[in-house]
Structure formats: C-alpha cells, structure tokens
C-alpha cells in the first residue's frame, strides 16, 4: 500500500509521540536517536543499531539514507537543545528524507506542573540544512 509523503510524516510523528507517551512519567526521559524507515509499513529502531544508516550519514549525509537503506522514505528523530525565540529549549527534531524531498519538523519538549515531559505541537523547522547534516555526521561517527 503506497502512502503519501504527508502520511509518512504523520506516521513518523505518531511513532515519536507514542514513545513520549510511554515515558510520560519519566522526569528524565530523553528520546534516543531514532531511525524510521518506510518498507511495507513504518519500522522504527535505534539509530545506534543501524550501521548502514550511520555509514551513509558519515560519508554522504542525510540525502544518502533512502538509497543506503533501500527505502522510499527515511526519517531520523533527535532529542536536542535548540535556540528558539531567543531561548534554549529542549525539542525533538524530525528530519524526513526522500530522494526528492526533505522536511524538518520540531516539537518542543514541554514540562507539566509535575516536571514530566510532554511533546508540544509539531512546527516546521527552519534549521539550516548543512547544520543538520553536520550534526548527523557527528552523531553517526560517535
């Protein structure tokens, strides 16, 4: 069953949101770098457990992921600190890559009154594409 780009982005966001809900009571939860691949459905796994993806990131950057993984669409989710609106805030960044399209979305990690994390609304990310590629290369090398 073919999905649209928008369907893939929505499924990737839902996979991240599900992980956040699983850790809703964990005050110190941080999303480990996550690889989401579209092959007969969405498959999610830790980026650390995907040597082909890490190799592609180190050598050619995010654009190489679909070919390296034999997938139509690939996404990576990272828990990072970003400068947004003049403040440094924790956020989850979702980088979506296809052979023709790329998208970056950001969800702030907000805190409840009890200090537990909740993902905020997803917003388009205006992060510099080269900055994202450099950060992913460093992550893949580590």
Image: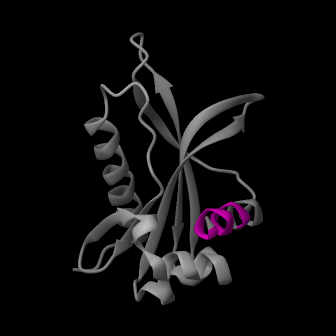
From the viewer's perspective, tell me whether residue 15 is left or right of residue 117: left
Image point (45%, 51%), residue name: 32
Between 53 and 95, the one nearer to me in the picture: 53
Q: Position of residue 70 (x, y in %)?
A: 41, 89
Image point (68%, 40%), residue name: 82
Image point (42%, 70%), residue name: 5
Vertical placement of residue 133 versus 121, above or below: below
Vertical placement of residue 71 versus 18, above or below: below
Rendered-image quadrant of the C terminus: bottom right
From the viewer's perspective, tell me whether residue 27 is left or right of residue 21: right
Image point (41%, 17%), residue name: 112
Q: Residue furthest front?
A: 142
Scheme by which the image is coloured: one colour
- Which residues lie in the magenta part? 134-141
Helix, strand or loop for the magenta stretch, by majority: helix
Vertical placement of residue 109 versus 44, above or below: above
Q: Position of residue 18 (x, y in %)?
A: 28, 45
Q: Position of residue 17 (x, y in %)?
A: 34, 44
Q: Is residue 100 visible?
A: no
From the viewer's perspective, tell me whether residue 30 is left or right of residue 126: left
Magenta residue check for 140: yes
């Amino acid at each position: 069953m073919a999905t649209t780009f928008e369907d893939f982005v929505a499924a990737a966001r839902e996979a991240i949101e599900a992980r956040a809900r699983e850790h809703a009571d964990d005050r110190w939860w941080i999303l480990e770098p996550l690889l989401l691949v579209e092959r007969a459905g969405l498959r999610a796994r830790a980026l650390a457990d995907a040597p082909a993806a890490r190799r592609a990131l180190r050598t050619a950057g995010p654009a190489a992921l679909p070919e390296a993984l034999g997938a139509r669409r690939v996404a990576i989710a990272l828990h990072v600190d970003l400068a947004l609106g003049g403040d440094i805030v924790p956020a989850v960044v979702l980088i979506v890559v296809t052979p023709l399209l790329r998208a970056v979305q950001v969800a702030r990690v907000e805190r409840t009154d009890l200090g537990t994390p909740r993902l905020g609304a997803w917003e388009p990310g205006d992060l510099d594409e080269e900055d994202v590629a450099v950060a992913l290369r460093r992550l893949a090398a580590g």
